[in-house]
């Protein structure tokens, strides 16, 4: 059967090495390797284990033999790969790149493309189902306090059937994710709130949800480019494709719905903690008063790619900066936040930037049906206009806080 957009398959690598080392049948690794070997791309951008499983290192691969280095999952890796395209890969202007991406990575690429910061036609995107990632520091603490295991002894980790599983050379340990999060461990807060679990904006959406009866990857074909890659790889004998089990398709849908419902619950909980109106503003002012002007929140944000610190009005030598600095940054990102969490995770002063930013972005989305990172469209209304309309409704009695 010739793959076409909208089709679903179970896909398995034919290479025994990739089949054993890769996750869920090694299909993603096999497709990336084939894209490189066939000349469809010039390089593959991936993430490999560094010093240990808590150290995720981005790597650009041009030798197909090295693809096995990036096989498997790293849930303790919290990198945002999309930002690397504009910062280090010359916007993919003259280099064709294949890359496996989480949902936030894909959204980041779309936001960069809107700003002329990446040439999407030169990027082959293999989207990865993602339930969330865990920061390295949290992971080590979690393993000690909940698994009672020395984190340095853990050689492998994975998420399966709602459980987080860690393996040492001698033993395997598992705890349900919901129990971990009840104890304030587990996924990053932005990951808990994320509603893009299957990134269908990519050329292929790949993962293990819905696979039954065999070791394979569930692949949804999301573009003509993805269909062509899968067709050529199958013709070349690189992968095998099988029709998905109907029950598996049903289960895949249920898992996705369950994850979305869970994300909605976390949004409600997190956003309610911020309060409304003046209460929220006071929290925002108080939290940002710890700012030391390192500008990391600007450097890592896809929505601010191309923006310079000099674009902000900042008094030299003054720490913290005036609240106007933060207000301007939030207003610039309000219609483009993809909830990647980088501005919060990398902030040396632990300012909950992503929490505030995501709350603003969700309000924008609910009011106007626009979602950042979903496609190449741009909003036709400004955050300032949103505020004006909201205030107008409040004054007319349509909404009371």
Image (cartoon, rainbow, N blue to C red):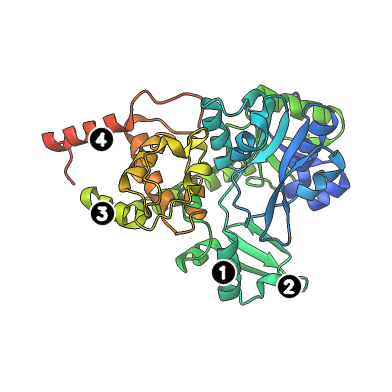
Mark 3 or 2, closer to the camera: 3
**CA distance separating discs 4 and 2:** 55 Å
Q: In this view, does 240 lie to the left or right of 105?
A: right
Q: In this view, does 96 lie above or below 207?
A: above
Q: Mark 1 points at which residue?
A: 142
Q: Earlier in the sequence, mark 4 or mark 2?
A: 2
Q: From the image, tell me which residue sits under label 4.
A: 387
CA separation, marks 3 and 4? 17 Å
Residue located farthest toward the left when viewing the structure as drawn: 396
Q: Which residue is drawn at 86% across and 49% down?
A: 17
Residue at image coords 59%, 39%: 83
Q: Residue 225's quadrant in the figure?
A: top right
> How far across and how far down the image is residue 124, in percent?
69, 30
> Depth-wise, is mark 1 or mark 3 nearer the camera?
3
Q: Mark 3 points at which residue?
A: 282
Task: Give SS at disc 2.
Answer: loop
């Amino acid at each position: 059967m010739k793959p076409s957009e909208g089709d679903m398959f179970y896909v398995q690598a034919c290479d025994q090495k990739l089949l054993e080392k890769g996750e869920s049948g090694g299909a993603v690794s096999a497709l990336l390797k084939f894209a490189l070997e066939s000349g469809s791309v010039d390089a593959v951008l991936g993430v490999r284990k560094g010093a240990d499983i808590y150290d995720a290192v981005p790597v650009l691969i041009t030798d197909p033999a090295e693809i096995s280095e990036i096989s498997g999952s790293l849930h303790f890796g919290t990198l945002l790969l999309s930002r690397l395209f504009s910062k280090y890969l010359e916007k993919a202007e003259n280099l064709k790149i294949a890359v496996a991406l989480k949902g936030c990575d894909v959204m980041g690429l779309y936001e960069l493309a809107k700003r002329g910061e990446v040439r999407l036609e030169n990027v082959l995107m293999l989207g990865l189902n993602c339930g969330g990632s865990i920061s390295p520091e949290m992971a080590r603490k979690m393993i000690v306090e909940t698994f009672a295991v020395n984190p340095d002894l853990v050689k492998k980790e994975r998420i399966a059937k709602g459980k987080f599983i860690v393996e040492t050379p001698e033993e395997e340990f598992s705890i349900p994710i919901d129990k971990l999060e009840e104890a304030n461990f587990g996924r990053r807060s932005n990951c808990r709130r994320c509603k893009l679990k299957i990134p269908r904006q990519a050329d292929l959406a790949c993962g293990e949800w819905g696979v039954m009866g065999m070791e394979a990857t569930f692949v949804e074909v999301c573009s003509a480019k993805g269909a062509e890659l899968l067709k050529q790889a199958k013709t070349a004998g690189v992968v095998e494709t099988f029709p998905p089990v109907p029950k598996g398709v049903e289960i895949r849908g249920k898992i996705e719905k369950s994850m979305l419902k869970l994300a909605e619950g976390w949004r409600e909980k997190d956003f309610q903690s911020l309060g409304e109106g003046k209460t929220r503003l006071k929290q925002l002012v108080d939290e940002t008063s710890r700012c030391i002007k390192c500008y990391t929140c600007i450097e890592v944000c896809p929505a601010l790619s191309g923006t310079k610190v000099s674009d902000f009005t900042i008094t030299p030598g003054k720490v913290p900066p005036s609240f106007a600095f933060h207000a301007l940054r939030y207003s610039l990102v309000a219609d483009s936040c993809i909830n990647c969490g980088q501005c919060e995770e990398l902030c040396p002063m632990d300012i909950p930037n992503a929490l505030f930013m995501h709350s603003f972005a969700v309000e924008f989305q609910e009011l106007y049906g626009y979602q950042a990172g979903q496609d190449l469209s741009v909003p036709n209304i400004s955050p300032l206009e949103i505020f004006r309309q909201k205030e107008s409704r409040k004054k007319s009695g349509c909404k009371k806080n």
